Image (tube, rainbow, N blue to C red):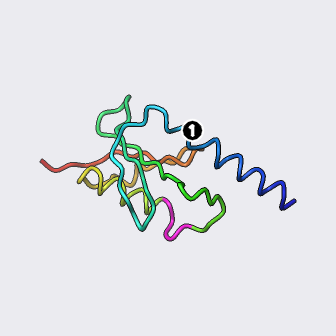
């Protein structure tokens, strides 16, 4: 069972960066030592997405802080705006997206 889990983690680690690295344009920020890429969502103005980069390829390590809190900090750092927590959504790939509120 452990060998299967390790093999699955290794496969995910190898395939995941190649799958989402194509054409990713955005701002890279660091939150608690973890790298995040924040980019605007194409379909919706004022909505941004945050994806954590797992460069260490450690699939089962515990996060320093819940990833939702890290994503909010990454969105706030990259955009300079506050995040509307009621719109924060996580998809199956682990990417968070939310509306941002910018004061003019």
Q: Which residue is mark 1?
A: 18
Relative depth, front residue between 17 and 43: 17
Q: Nearer the viewer, residue 39 or 34?
A: 34
The answer to whether 4 appears left or right of 54 in the picture is: right
State the residue in front, 41 or 15: 15
Residue extending farthest bottom: 64
Residue 25, given in percent of the width and then of the height, sits at 37, 37
Q: Position of residue 93 (x, y in %)?
A: 58, 44
7, 77: nearer the viewer = 7
- Residue lying farthest left? 104
Q: Residue at x 62, y 60 (%)?
A: 58
Q: Is residue 10 above or below residue 46?
A: below
Residue for point 29% across, 52% down: 78
Tally of numbered tags: 1
33 falls in the magenta region: no
What residue sits 47% from the left and 59% below the top?
Answer: 68
Q: Residue at x 36, y 50 (%)?
A: 28
Looking at the image, residue 43 sits to the left or right of residue 16; the answer is left
The answer to which quarter of the image holds residue 16 is top right
Q: Say which element carries label 1.
A: helix
**Secondary structure that dominates the magenta span:** loop
Please provide percent x and percent y for residue 91: 55, 44
The question of residue 66 being in magenta is answered with yes
Furthest toward the top, the residue is: 43
Q: Is residue 43 above or below residue 8?
A: above
Q: Residues within 10 Å of mark 1 (few under 14, many from 20)?
A: few
* Numbered range of the magenta stretch: 63-67
Q: Quadrant of the N terminus?
A: bottom right
Residue 94 placed where, x, y %? 55, 49
């Amino acid at each position: 069972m452990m060998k299967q889990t390790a093999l699955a983690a290794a496969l995910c680690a190898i395939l995941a960066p190649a799958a989402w690295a194509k054409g990713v344009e955005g701002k890279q920020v660091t939150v608690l030592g973890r790298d995040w890429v924040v980019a605007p969502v194409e379909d919706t103005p004022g909505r941004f997405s945050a994806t954590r980069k797992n460069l260490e390829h450690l699939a089962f390590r515990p996060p320093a802080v819940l990833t939702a809190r890290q994503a909010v900090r990454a969105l706030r750092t990259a955009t300079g705006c506050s995040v509307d927590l009621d719109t924060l959504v996580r998809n199956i790939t682990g990417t968070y997206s939310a509306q941002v509120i910018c004061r003019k």
